[in-house]
Amino acid sequence: MEFFSFFLTHEESEAFIQLNTNIFETNIINIGILIGILLYAYKSSFVQVLNNRQEEIAKVFENAEKDVLNASNYYSQAEKGFTQSFFWLNSWKMLYEKEKIEIVNKKYNLVKSGLLESFATTENLIRNFENKSFLLLQRYIVYLTISKILRKFLLLSEGEQSKLIEVTLSKLGGFKK
């Protein structure tokens, strides 16, 4: 109850609520001055501080919007760059695989031609060896045959030798009798 006592006189405080219209007793002027000072202080400092803070917050929001926009642009550019890089990577991969296949085919053809040449050379060497061996074998057989004939011929008497020579010449189409 004493809270409202500045509006009331001492006697009236017991009557509970009655207004005291005497300005000097109730300190309404002091309260008015206090309220005026508070309003002035509010307008001069708090409003300015609040306005400054509101502007700062607005700037922060604007900067954040710009940052989001820049980040979005950067992301879209990065995505385009990634797409282009991926395209080039696939292109290079296909080109590399194509070149790799060409290189393998070239090496295969080179090795194949080298092997074919080696086989042809080996086949020619074997053929030459067979021909030489065949000629040597023929010579050996002729040599054996001639040596046998010569041995038998030398074991014959002179008459038999001359008769054998005449018969052989006549069979070969030599001189006629």
Image (cartoon, grey):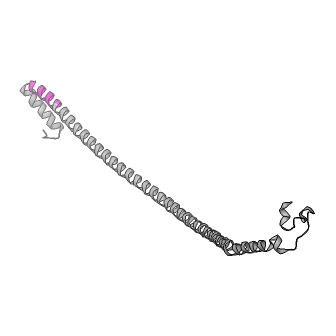
- Residue 147 within the segment the image draws in magenta: yes
Q: Which residues are magenta?
A: 144-156
Total numbered labels: 0
Of the pair 4 and 147, the residue shown nearer to us: 4
Of the pair 171 and 6, the residue shown nearer to us: 6
Locate the N terminus by quadrant: bottom right
In the image, is 173 to the left or to the right of 116? left
In the image, is 21 to the left or to the right of 91? right
Where is residue 45 shown, x and y percent of the image? 66, 73
In the image, is 107 to the left or to the right of 149? right
Where is residue 174 shown, x and y percent of the image? 14, 41
- Residue 92 within the segment the image draws in magenta: no
Q: Does the magenta stretch mainly form a helix, a strand or a loop?
A: helix
Outermost residue toward the left in this view: 158
The residue at 57%/64% (across/down) is 75
The residue at 79%/74% (across/down) is 29
> Residue 177 occupies which quadrant of the picture?
top left
The residue at 20%/32% (across/down) is 141
> Residue 20 occupies which quadrant of the picture?
bottom right
Of the pair 19 and 161, the residue shown nearer to us: 19
Where is residue 122 shown, x and y percent of the image? 29, 43
From what the image shows, is residue 154 above or below residue 175?
above
The residue at 11%/26% (across/down) is 151
Of the pair 73 and 10, the residue shown nearer to us: 10
In the image, is 32 to the left or to the right of 117? right
From what the image shows, is residue 92 above or below residue 44?
above
Where is residue 131 shown, x and y percent of the image? 24, 40
Outermost residue toward the right in this view: 15
